[in-house]
Amino acid sequence: MENTNLKPVIRFPEFTENWVTEKLRTKISFIAGYAFKSVKMKNVDSKYQLIKMSNIYRNQLDLKRNPSYWGDIDSKLEKYLLKKNDILLTLTGTVGKKDYGYSIVIPKNNRFLLNQRLVCLRAIPEKSNEHFINYLIKTSRFYYLFFSESKGGTGNQANVGVEDLRNIQLPIPKIAEQQKIANFLTSVDERITSLKEKKDTLLDFKKSVMQKIFNQDIRFKDDNGNDFPDWDEKVLGKVCSKESSNISANSLKNNNGTYKIYGATGHLQNVDFYKEENPYIAIIKDGSGVGRTLLCEAKSSVLGTLDILKTIDNNNLYFIYSLLNQIHFEKYVSGSTIPHIYFKDYSKELVKVPKPKEQIKITNYLSVLDDKIEGIQQKIDASVDFKKGLLQKMFV
C-alpha cells in the first residue's frame, strides 16, 4: 500500500520514490530459536556456542556472559546455525518494562546456534539489506509496533510472537536506497567504534601509568629538577577521615533543585539542598558496587549508603582518590546477604604517600589524561546523539 507521505526527512538526492508500507515477512526471513536441552549443553568451549537471551543485553553481544556450548549438530539443527550478519532479536522480557527487543549482529559464520526466545532476521537477497534491517529495528516506529504486539506469559513475563513480528508493517524503500542508508549509518558506527577504542586505549594507558606511579617506578621532580623526598608509609586513617550521611532515597521524592546528589550509580538527580561545601570523595559502603569510589563536586550530597571521605594534613583530594582506587576493598567486605565495608577496618590499610607538592605534580599529570579521556567521551556522546537523530530522520 503506497502513501504519498512516505518520504523521510533526510534523504539522498538520487532517490525520490515514496517508500512502501509492507509486512516485514515480505523483506525478511524469520527463524525462531530452538529449545536446546540444557542437560546437553557444555560449559567448556566446543565446536559451537549457543546464543541465549543472557548473551544479548542493551544491543550488545556478550559471549562471556554465562556461556553454553554444543558439540556436533545433525540435519535437524542445521537450520539454527547462524550466518555472519544475521540479526538476532530478543522476544521475552518483563511485563511493564522494555528489557527486551534488543538486537545484535552475528560477527562470523558457522560458530553460533540460535537458542529459544530469540529470533533470527535474515535479509532476503535482492529485497533487503542486512545492515538496513539492523537499523530499521532500532527506530522508534519499530519499537512502538514491537511492544504493541507484546503479550503476557508465565508470571510477569512478556513475549512477542514470531508470527506477530513477521506481520508488523513498516515503510521500506527499494534495495538501492536501503544500501545507501546502511552504508552511511555504518560509517557513523565505525566512527563511534573508533572513538571508543581510542578511549579504551587511553584508559588502559592511564591504568598502567597509575600502577607505575604508586609502585614508584615513575617519580616526578620538583620545580628545580630535584628529587622529592621518599614516600611516607601510613595507615589510610591518617590521610583521610570519614563522615556519614543520613539522606535516604525517600527524601528525594518530589525534590528538584540545582544541587547534585550521588548514589551507588553516580549522579542521581538534582535536589534543593546540599551537605558538602567543598569537593570530596564518596565510597559505596554496602550493597552493589561496595568499595567503588566517586569523586563528588562541591555543594552536593550523597545517600546514606555511601560514606564521605575527606583529606587531612594538606593531602591532595584527587591524589587520595587515585590512591583509594588502588586498594582492593573486597578484602574488607563482611556480610553474606548485603556486602558491607566499615571505615574502622579499611582505615587500617597501609599506604605510601608522597609529600603534598609531589601529590600535586602527580595530580596535574593524571588530570591531563582525564581531560583527554573526557574529550573523547564528549565526541562519543555527540556521535551517538547524531546517530539517534539520523534514525529518526532517515526512516519514515
Image: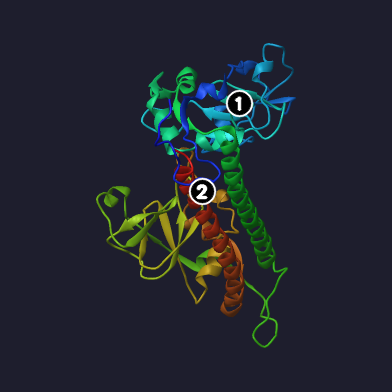
Numbered circle sitting on residue 341: none
The N terminus, quarter of image: top left
Of 131 and 342, the residue lying toward us: 131
Per the image, the residue denoted by label 2 is: 387
Q: Quadrant of residue 130?
A: top right
Q: Is residue 99 left or right of residue 50?
A: left
Q: Position of residue 236 (x, y in %)?
A: 54, 64
Q: Quadrant of residue 68?
A: top right
Of 272 and 324, the residue lying toward us: 272
Q: Where is residue 238 in the image (x, y as percent from the top left)?
A: 51, 69
The residue at 70%/85% (across/down) is 226
Choose the circle earlier in sequence order: 2 or 1. Answer: 1
The residue at 54%/50% (across/down) is 332
Asked if residue 7 is positioned above or below residue 356 in the image, the reply reads above
Per the image, the residue denoted by label 1 is: 122
Q: In this view, does 82 lie to the left or right of 145?
A: right
The C terminus, quarter of image: top left
Amino acid type shown at disc 2 = Lys
